[in-house]
Amino acid sequence: MSAAVSPSSRTSPRTVLISGASIAGPALAHWLHRYGFAVTVVERAPELRTGGYKVDIRGAAVEVAERMGILADIQRASTDMRTGAYVNDDGKRIATLPAALFGARVGRDDEIMRGDLARILYERTRADVEYVFGDSITSLTERADHGRGGVDVTFERGAPRRFDLAVGADGVHSNVRRLAFGPEEQFARHLGAYISAFSMPNELGLDREELYHAVPGRLSCVYSSAGDPAAKGLLTFRSPRLSYDHRQPDRQLALLEAAFKDVGVRPSGGWTQIPRLLEAARAADDFYFDGLQLIEMDRWSRGRVVLLGDAAHCASPASGQGTGMALVGAYVLAGELAAGRGPEEAFDRYEREMRGYVAVNHALAGKFAEEMTADTRRQIRFRHLMMRILPYMPWKNLVAKKIAEEVQRGANAITLKDHPAPAAAAGHGPAAGHAPVAGHAPAAGSPTYAA
């Protein structure tokens, strides 16, 4: 790896505001602090959000996790799933396969609950990074001041401040993207389905197992992971774009119930657990509902504002790559900023390095979104048959390899650079160098992105 870059000798910015404390934001904060930047993370939620479903760490993301020093933490918190099975209407297992084959994982690939990974990243950065919970950005104004650019930021609750850079790592419904680039509708492409996830009691007594049930246009799942006494429910259904507010769970629950209202109720047929899953969704305090959609943008940066992770290029849960892309993107962006270049050049290089990786996974997401919800009972019966006979096929290893091939192609569609070795970060504690800018007026002609 190349020699360390001295913070005093570089021309790149030194104070960075990151919006979003899920995965991409804290991962970027980790690297930027190690490179000597002073980092603030602002998060709308009042505290760290530790809910969510299981996520995969594959391919290049495994290498990034190792370079971060968190791979062992991920392995200790692994879901340790054993098997995946499809069940009939009565819950009888009709086809069972190893969980690694279900998840297309090979080698050191692993799986972890999203909340556990968020906690690992937060614990690794909380002593060195300023976290501001319960607040949100309301405007971003770029300005030049004696030859040094910056971004003046106003917040819903906190006092205005100035930063050298602002990063939107705030997810598919990014507030920073809306402020700096425009409404979400300009960039979102619906993949024809919706997904919901939530915690529920483990009434089926599952032990590191996931059960799936399919009817035309709908897929349901219940699973339990290592170390969690509760289970998780997952419901997916095919639908054109629906109208709802992503912050109104009552409306989302109504849409979910309408999609599954005739499933699992005699004599309509379907898994008899479906009414129980809908009941659990209503009671859950971590209920999640969203469309399977891509975020497609011509540019991920504008001036000194840049997007990262799902905010820039969401590949939807159908890809199975969102978390890995967030970790990889954070590594790439921080490395380019640490190389001593100005922000525009660093952002350009970050985009060039990531674009091909993103494009491969976007294509896979579109394909997998269609496969998640089969159209006909005939397709479902054929899928079950293939799963039942796979363990007995003499060429089963070749088939398993073929199943994993596409996912692995997406997971490894980038070659990681050896970015500058992180300099010692001593003296660069939380919010170092951040000065409030209350009372400043934007310079004439400076772009302002406001709510």
Image (tube, rainbow, N blue to C red):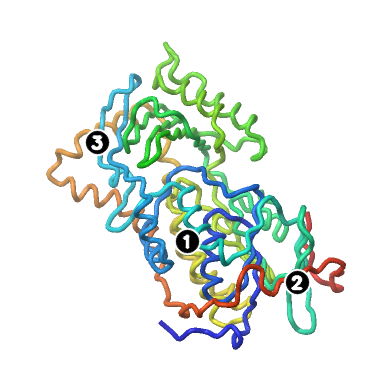
The label shown at residue 386 is 3
Would you call the spot at circle 3 few (<14 residues within 10 Å), some (14-19), or many (20 or more)? few
Q: Residue at x 55, y 27 (%)?
A: 283
Q: In this view, which residue lies farthest toward the bottom?
A: 9
Badge 1 crowding class, 10 Å Cα cut-off, few under 14, some 14 to 19, many 20 or more, is many
Position of residue 156 in the picture relative to residue 56 (left or right): right
At label 1, which amino acid type do we have?
A: Leu
> Which of marks 1 and 3 precedes in the sequence?
1
Q: Amino acid at mark 3?
A: Met
Horizontal side, residue 305 vs residue 197: left or right: right
* N-terminal label among 1 and 2: 1
Question: Which percent across, then down, holds residue 139?
Answer: 77, 59
Q: How far is disc 3 from disc 1 in space, using C-alphas? A: 35 Å
Which quadrant would the C terminus be assigned to in this image? bottom right
Q: Position of residue 256 (x, y in %)?
A: 55, 29
Which disc number belongs to residue 161? none
